[in-house]
Amino acid sequence: QVQLVESGGGLVQPGGSLRLSCTASGSIGSINAMDWYRQAPGKERELVATMTSGGTTNYADSVKGRFTDSRDNAKNTVYLQMNSLKPEDTAVYYCNWVVSGRSYWGPGTQVTVSS
């Protein structure tokens, strides 16, 4: 089993920045992917950023150029640096890891972008 915990969410003004963290614990075997999703009220969960085990990253068009995915292998942690935040970025952000073919989710962290 793998446990994931997100942190770093909060309230920020438009144009501001936040850095989310996702830390994994437990039996971390072969990591296939480390992804970030978000879900806004009344909307479906959407993929925001992906990172392969080799470190290749991809981003949704809506966040490309503003969000950056990175990781610290020694800490079993991935980060999502979010800059130039917009009100439409408001959502609960979840990390999802695929480890040895199984999918694991964190409980999510709320990000609210509002003046």
Image: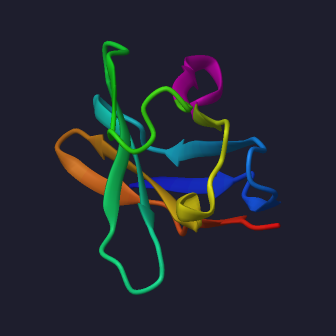
Query: In this image, 74 relative to 59: left or right?
Result: right
Q: Quadrant of residue 67?
A: top right
| 64 relative to 25, above or below | above
Q: Which quadrant would the N terminus be assigned to in this image?
A: bottom left
Q: Nearer the viewer, residue 53 or 114?
A: 114
| 5 relative to 83, above or below | below
Q: Residue at x 50, y 47 (%)?
A: 26
Residue 22 location (% of width, % of height): 59, 45
Residue 109 location (% of width, % of height): 63, 64
Within the magenta stretch, is there residue 7?
no
Query: In this image, 24 relative to 114: left or right?
Result: left
| 66 relative to 38, above or below | above
Residue 49 location (% of width, % of height): 39, 39
Q: Residue at x 57, y 31 (%)?
A: 76
Q: Quadrant of residue 100?
A: top left
Outermost residue, left side: 101
Q: Nearer the viewer, residue 27 or 87?
A: 87
What is the image's colouring? rainbow
The magenta stretch is 68-77
Q: Nearer the viewer, residue 32 or 11?
A: 11
Q: How many marks?
A: 0
Q: Residue at x 78, y 44 (%)?
A: 16
Q: Which quadrant would the C terminus be assigned to in this image?
A: bottom right
Q: Nearer the viewer, residue 49 or 72?
A: 49
Q: Main secondary structure of the magenta part?
A: strand
| 75 relative to 85, above or below | above
Query: In this image, 107 relative to 9: left or right?
Result: left
Q: Quadrant of residue 101?
A: top left
Residue 42 location (% of width, % of height): 39, 86
